[in-house]
Each structure stands twice: as structure tokens, then as C-alpha cells.
Amino acid sequence: MDKNIENINTNINCSDFQEMTSNVLIRHKSILDIITKLDEYNARINRAVIKSVTSCGCISIDAKKQEYNSESLEELKKSLKSHLEGELCEVCSEKIEEEIGSYLFYLAALCDTLEINLSDILNNEYDNLKTLGIYNLK
């Protein structure tokens, strides 16, 4: 991704994104369309990740039972694995980013339709994470 575009994008906030979504959402304005589009893009994200493993091979999954025998939460955090090996190639990364972007679009559309502020949700979740820290355990 072009570094100039990347720097510009860091200045976009959730409220601006939600407002832009509201301005451009025409065809799938119905709540029914929005929630089914969220499901569709969730599946497309999953498919893109799986294709990175099965078609491209830039990443692989080596899943094993997680061991929860650590004495402290910090040790436990360090010992748990993502089961991913390798790195996404540029093509796969771009595809996954594209699908996540579309998902975020419909998530913002859902918030707008329900008159919920996406920024407030993000800030509340951040505050919960900050307050509870490791004890949030998601």
C-alpha cells in the first residue's frame, strides 16, 4: 500500500466512516440486506484466509491442543499459540483487507441504521479492555 495513502487513512475516525457509509449506501439500505451482507462478508473473510492456506500456501495452520498449565496469566499469554505459520503474501493480504473493509462498511451501515454510534461502541470496548486488562479474557 502506498505510504501516503496509509498516512491519510490513519486520520479517518469511526464517525467519519459511519457518515460516509450512510451517504453512499443506496442499494442495500434495508436492515435485512445489511445483516445478510455482514454474514456474506464474514464468510468471504473466512474463505480468503482459508484460500491463503489451501490455494496460495503462504500461510499454514498447525493446530494442536492449547496447554493451560502456566502458573501466571503472563506466562499463559506467552505460551498460547495462534496455530499460524508463515506470513500472508501481498496478494492474500490485499484480498483479506478488501473483505474486512467491506465487512466494516456493512457494520457501519448497521450501526447507522440502528442509530448507534460506532465510535461510542469502539470507545466503550476500549475502555472495558483498558479497565479490565488481562482479566477481560476474551
Image: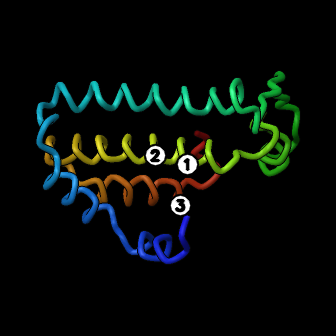
Which one is in front in this view, the residue at disc 3 or the one at disc 2? 2
Q: Nearer the viewer, residue 135 or 55?
A: 55
The residue that mark 2 highlights is: 98
Residue type beneath disc 3? Lys
Disc 2 secondary structure class: helix
Residue 115 % position (x, y): 14, 47
Disc 3 secondary structure class: helix
Q: Nearer the viewer, residue 133 or 46?
A: 46
Disc 1 secondary structure class: helix
Residue 42 % position (x, y): 44, 30
Distance between mark 3 and mark 2 Cα atoms: 29 Å
Residue type beneath disc 1? Glu
The residue that mark 1 highlights is: 94
Applied colour scheme:
rainbow
1 and 2 marks in contact (CB < 8 Å): yes
Distance between mark 1 and mark 2 Cα atoms: 6 Å
Mark 2 is surrounded, within 10 Å at the Cα level, by few (under 14), some (14 to 19) or many (20 or more) other residues, namely: some
Q: Quadrant of the C terminus?
A: top right
Mark 1 is surrounded, within 10 Å at the Cα level, by few (under 14), some (14 to 19) or many (20 or more) other residues, namely: some
Q: Earlier in the sequence, mark 1 or mark 3?
A: 1
